[in-house]
Amino acid sequence: MIRYLQDNVIEFEIVFVDPDNNDIPVDPAVVTFQFWYSQDSVTPATAYGSVITYSNATSPAVNTICRIQNEDGLYCYRCRIDTTPLTIVGDYGMGIGKWKSTGAGQAAANDYVLVQAS
């Protein structure tokens, strides 16, 4: 799930589940996130900032992964990225949030968001 918050901040959220066990939620050993960005519809995306690793945060903040219980009672991971310094050339750019977990719940997932020029 992706949310646009105030001041050009994007919030990414993920719940890791076991698809082989009725999608029961799992709690991975290590969770990382990295934001990738393309400033137009042609240029391949490149990494924006470094890889962020979850380290027991329980409150959402920019450039931090936190683990919280969501509205459904599931533990989810959230990461906020400030996109203020980024520019768009042409009609739109693309942001990609790349999640990765290791250990129990090992998985990788990408979230995509199109950003339209104003």
Image (cartoon, rainbow, N blue to C red):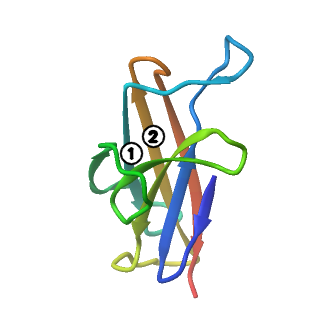
Quadrant, the C terminus = bottom right
> Cβ–Cβ below 8 Å for labels 2 and 1?
yes
Q: Residue placed at 53% from the left, 81% from the top?
A: 6
Residue lying farthest top? Answer: 20
8 up-or-down from 41: above or below: below
Going by the numbered disc 1, the residue's amino acid type is Phe
* Camera-side residue of 21 and 86: 21
Q: Residue placed at 67% from the left, 11% from the top?
A: 20
**Whole-percent x, y for residue 72 in the image:** 72, 44
Going by the numbered disc 2, the residue's amino acid type is Trp
Q: Residue placed at 70% from the left, 22% from the top?
A: 23
**Whole-percent x, y for residue 32 in the image:** 36, 40
108 up-or-down from 98: above or below: above
Residue under pointer 1: 33
**Separation of marks 2 and 1 at Cα, in angstroms:** 5 Å
User: In the image, 110: left or right of 62?
Assistant: right
* Camera-side residue of 5 and 72: 72
Disc number at residue 53? Answer: none
Residue under pointer 2: 99
Q: Residues within 10 Å of mark 2 (few under 14, many from 20)?
A: many
**Whole-percent x, y for residue 117 in the image:** 56, 82
Residue lying farthest bottom? Answer: 118
User: In the image, 53: left or right of 74?
Assistant: left
* Camera-side residue of 87 and 4: 4
104 up-or-down from 86: above or below: above
Q: Residue placed at 39% from the left, 54% from the top?
A: 35
57 up-or-down from 117: above or below: above
* Camera-side residue of 111 and 104: 104
Element assignment for label 2:
strand
Sooner in the amino-acid sequence: mark 2 or mark 1:
1
